[in-house]
Amino acid sequence: MKTIVRLAGSIILFWAVGMAGSAQQNQTDHAVVSFTNPAKPGTVEVDVREGSITVRGYEGKDVIIDARWRERVLIGEKREMEAALAGAEEELDQEELARKKAQAEKSRGMKMLAVESMGLTVEEEDNVIQVRVEEGKRAVDLIIQVPFSTSLQLSCRDDERGVTVERVNGEIEVDTSDGPIVLTGVSGPVVADSSDGEIKVVFGKITPGKPMSLSAMDGDIDITLPLDVKASLKLKTDEGQIFTDFDVQLTPSQQKKEEDERKDGGGYRVTYEKVTLGLINGGGTEIQLTTYEGNIYIRKAK
Amino acid sequence: MNCERMKDLLADYLAGELDEKTLAEAQGHLAGCAACRGELESLSAIWTKLGVLPKEQPSDALRSRFYDMLEAYKENLAKGGIAARPLHSISLWLSRLMPRRPAYQLALAFGLIIAGLGSGYFLNVRSRSNARFEVATLKQEVDEMRRTVAVSLLKQASPSERLMGVSWSSRIDQPGGEIITALLETLDHDSNVNVRLAAVDALYLFYGHREVKDGLVRSLAGQTSPLVQLALIDLLVGIRERRAAEALEGLIQDHKLNPKVKKRAELGLVQLS
């Protein structure tokens, strides 16, 4: 079964025209989509270029999607336009620049009517719901309600508000380039990566056995684990530091390499990777935390 | 006292093990109850018959047979002890890992374990010398099983399962071409940064293989995540792979490169030269 819901058609057209400019500030789209087999945990995949994603678990069977379009035209495009008008960026294509300049000139003193489709597409197939936002339109804040056991695959680029997830027990895969990742009351295996943002995860409980991994280039990683968690931590940071209030039992790194090239006229070398292995309550679920500059915080649940 | 209770006490009554008070009560009941008296009589007849059976005396032959067997068992235990330990630890290891896997991927693996353990025990019982050979075979089979499981896990949609696949790969003693290809494939094409990072760590363990070094050098140019780039540079510089110099120079030329990665690449170039 394949359901495609294309949103923001004529309704929004009438609405937008009727309410004129003021409508643009809080323009929203709303969609309710059900899984093919609601008895089985489904998956929700969201990919947003510019915008934020908030997912909350709730006691229902359907997935409820609310999209709040931001008033401004694409942040990136606006930036580009400003740069173009200032005549600064040499990286931009000259022809494109000239065209944008001319367009900006033409629309001077006028306001934009948002009558076209906002470009939100929701698609369901085999218990997988895909939410996509067309690029090159306006930035959007998505608020999605899902059944507790849903698995999530969230991708959010170029936006500072990032991804927020609350009370979802399924497997969670998240990546952001700029924004933070904040997960609260989650339990499933979490695999998350952020280039510039920080990652904060508060686990309600831990699904045992499934490995997890969090990585951040510049931001901190801050996780809160249940008191009685059994975990094997693999911690790796280049310039950051590691803090914890758990009683972590550090074990010698397994990443030791001995090299004996003396036979071939070389030298003998023992190297250690910058990896720290730590066991909490005797070890268990594998959790790898990797940062470059950011610190790592491992907290006990209060 | 009722008949129910009396029946429970009959055996003790015959053996003379009742205390005075209960004995008096029992006698009182027996005097007034014909059914229980009948029961007592038939039971007592059986007891008497049992009493006249001759006692079985163990023959001298039995004694010596027993001690022979005991000696043989002790000897076996002393010699077989070394061979038995690795078997035990492998099965412990298996039992620790098994229950967590999704049923489908492991159907094949389970088959292999059963075949491995089954034939292992069978041969161990048969003879000591065979047991040692069999442990080696079993190790190979476990390796083979890990390979199968790792390759299948690496193809899963769930990043957590792919991480598990990488982790299984790194436990293999003799990785073979299949695992190395799968890990390099993961390093180059996996959509998840965390899985790619784990693949770098796993490949580090196998860098003695030529195709691993080749693959790592080749992979550097295609990586987009700064964390993966850093991990690869660290690895290549760590193992003094001189052919990486060219790849590092290429990386430094890329004007979109993260400045921190660029710094590390430049440092790496100096260390390699």
Image: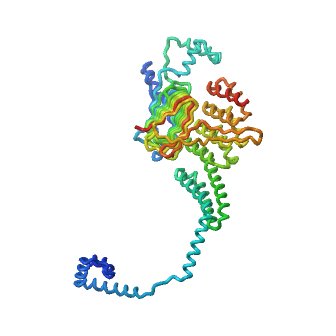
Quarter-of-image position of residue A49: top right
- Does A286 sit above or below residue B141? above
Quarter-of-image position of residue B245: top right
Is residue B92 among the parts visible in the rendering? yes
Q: How many marks?
A: 0
Is residue A177 among the parts visible in the rendering? no
Which color scheme does this rendered protein use?
rainbow
In which quadrant will I find the C terminus of chain A? top left
**Residue A291: image location, x then y, percent:** 56, 32
Q: Nearer the viewer, residue A88 or B184?
A: B184
Name the residue rendered at 69%, 48% in the picture.
Answer: B176
Name the residue rendered at 44%, 42% in the picture.
Answer: A205
Left or right: B4 in relation to B195: left
- Does B213 sit above or below residue B80? above
- Does B97 sit above or below residue B231? below
Q: Nearer the viewer, residue A197 or A164?
A: A197
**Residue B122: image location, x then y, percent:** 62, 65
**Residue A22: image location, x then y, percent:** 42, 19
Left or right: B139 in relation to A9: right
Left or right: A134 in relation to B174: left
Q: Nearer the viewer, residue B240 or A193?
A: B240
**Residue B19: image location, x then y, percent:** 27, 77
